[in-house]
Amino acid sequence: GAVVSQHPSWVICKSGTSVKIECRSLDFQATTMFWYRQFPKQSLMLMATSNEGSKATYEQGVEKDKFLINHASLTLSTLTVTSAHPEDSSFYICSARPGGPESSYNSPLHFGNGTRLTVT
Amino acid sequence: KQEVTQIPAALSVPEGENLVLNCSFTDSAIYNLQWFRQDPGKGLTSLLLIQSSQREQTSGRLNASLDKSSGRSTLYIAASQPGDSATYLCALSTGTASKLTFGTGTRLQVTL
C-alpha cells in the first residue's frame, strides 16, 4: 500500500535555530502534500498545502516566512521551521494522496509517522 | 466554517464489548469522511473512508456510517480488543484540494 515516510521522527533544537523536516512518498508520486500540526491533546490542524513545482498554500494564521515549504519533486516535500521558538514545539505530520491533480478526492490520504519537535 | 466534534472525548471499555464512537459536523457539503486511528506519538492510520454518496463502509470488525442530513457519522467497533486502544479521529474533506478538517478525537482504552 501507499507509504509516506517522515524524517526525522523527533528532533530537539535550540531556540533561534532552523529545523528541516522531510516527507517522502515511497511508492507513489504525489503532486500535492499536506502539512499538519498537532499540539498535545489536540486534533490536527492543517498548516499548508504543498504543491510540486509551485508555491505552497498556507492556511490563515500560519506564517509562510517562518514555515518554509519546498516541494521540489513528486516524492518529496520539506518543511523548514526557521528561527524556531519554544512555542513552535509540536508534532508535525505530513500526508499525501497517490496521483496528480486529477486524482479522486475519494481516495484515502496517507500520513507519515510524524515528527516531534522540541525547541529548548 | 466546518466544525467537527467527537463524543465521547475518552472511553474505557472491557475487552469483548461492542462500542460506538460518534462524530458530528456542521457543514453537510462534504466529499467524504474518513476515520483514522492514531497511536500515542505516532502518525495516522486510515481505517475507513465513506464517500458522500455512501451510507456505510465495513472493514473487519469496523463499521462506519454516514448520515449527511443530520451531520453525523459513527464508527462501530465489534468485539473490542486491547490492541484497539488508541485515539480515533474522524476527518471530513470539503472544498478544494481535498483538505481535511479533523475532529477532536476519542481516546479509547480497552482493558483486559
Image: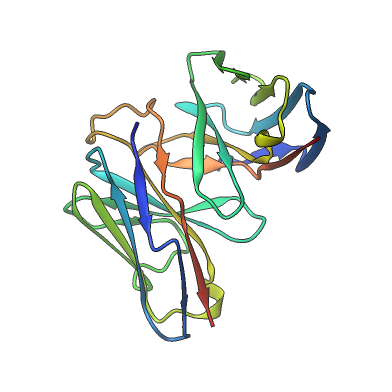
Residue drawn 45% across the image and 26% down it: B31
Q: Is residue A107 above or below residue A40?
A: above
Where residue B26 appears, x then y in whole percent? 62, 34
Position of residue B92 in the picture relative to residue B62 (left or right): left
Point out residue A55 in the picture as x, y percentages from the top left corner. Answer: 23, 58
**Residue A67, can we see it?**
yes
Identify which residue is drawn at 70% across, 19% down: B78
Q: Where is residue A46 in the image (x, y as percent from the top left)?
A: 47, 52
In the image, residue B111 sits, relative to residue B15, either above or below, namely below
B46 relative position to A23: left or right: right
> Which residue is rendered at x = 37% and y = 77% of the image?
A82
Mark yes or no: residue B30 visible. Answer: no
Residue B52, relative to residue B102: is it above or below?
A: above
Taking the image as shown, residue A65 lies to the left or right of residue B4, namely left
In the rendered image, residue A56, in percent from the top left (x then y), is placed at 29, 56
User: In the rendered image of this protein, does residue A76 appear above or below residue B8?
Assistant: below
> Dividing the image into 4 quarters, which one contains the C terminus of chain A?
bottom right
Q: Quadrant of residue B107?
A: top right
Residue B65 occupies which quadrant of the picture? top right
Which quadrant would the N terminus of chain A be assigned to in this image?
top left
Report the residue that reaches farthest toward the front: B112
Which residue sits at x=66%, y=34%?
A: B84
- Judging from the image, the colouring scheme is rainbow
Q: Nearer the viewer, residue A35 or B107?
A: B107
